[in-house]
Image (spheres, grey):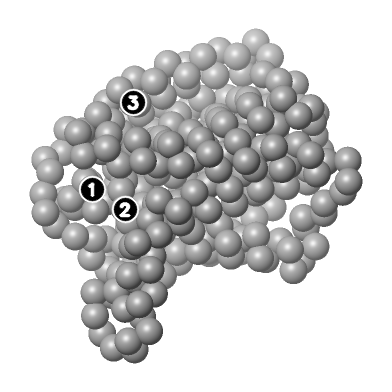
Amino acid sequence: METIDAIILGVIQGLTEFLPVSSSGHLELGKAILGDESVPEESLLFTVVLHFATALSTIVIFRKDIFQIIKGLLQFKKNDETMFSLRIIVSMIPAVLVGLFFEEQLEQLFGGNILLVGFMLIITAILLWLADKAKDTNKIVTTSNAFVIGIAQAIAMLPGISRSGATISTSVLLGNDKTKAARFSFLMVIPLIFGKIGKDLLSGDLNFSAENNTPLILGFIAAFISGLFACTWMISLVKKSKLSYFALYCVIVGIVAIIFGFIK
């Protein structure tokens, strides 16, 4: 992979991880447009590195929240922080099960299946449009809500379904406060990303070599910096109920991807 391609894909990942337009779908589209001929293992490695970068940017943005959660957990008693952590764990269950039992099938979908990406972007657009029409409340995410949101996150493992879009939309449609929905959405993915990277490192699935270090590093930096910007922007957009604009964007890109997929 060329260094400029790595930077472009890193920026795409950083922006689209938090904006509700599907980072995985845009990465697949970016690879198709740039002519990335990486074998599936290399492609997966690059994708994982970029997700790691955006996970770190999430930690930076929510560092005060994370510190407060850790502080509450260390009190070893039932409080808001332990209940929030419990809901995060509950939300992880569907994605963990899908990852354990359908990992190979999922990896096969990340090979330039542009038609699938296009149709999934249309579904993302519908979710965003519905969420944008929902009334705002002061309700917090409950444990039962967390599991349903977790199911949405598991479905969002498909390229083209926006993880943030699916989880925030699901949370809002369940009647939760939009700002709290965004916060929960961004925090719930952190343990999953680190867990996936740890699993791949232990299993030897991620193999680094001297020839691909530079693109990986540049892609990581690009994703981290753009992720900081996009995460902050997205929180503001959710508060202002601006998801319908992203719904329109997803429809347009989805239609283009479907057309591209048919003529490719």
Give neighbour class at mark 2: few <14, some 14-19, many 20+ (Cα, 10 Å): some
Residue appearing at x 33%, y 56% in the figure: 184
Answer whether residue 129 is visible to the viewer in this image: no
Q: Quick one: quadrant of the C terminus?
A: top right
- Whether the residues at callouts 1 and 2 have beta carbons within 8 Å, the answer is yes
Residue occupied by mark 1: 179
The CA span between labels 1 and 2 is: 6 Å
Residue reaching furthest to the right: 210
Residue occupied by mark 2: 183
Name the mark on residue 247.
Answer: 3
Residue appearing at x 33%, y 62% in the figure: 65
Amino acid type indicated by mark 3? Ala
- From the top left corner, tell me how far across and down residue 135 is, in percent: 11, 40
- When the figure is inspected, residue 11 is found, relative to residue 174, above or below; the finding is above
Towards the viewer: 229 or 37: 229
The CA span between labels 2 and 3 is: 20 Å
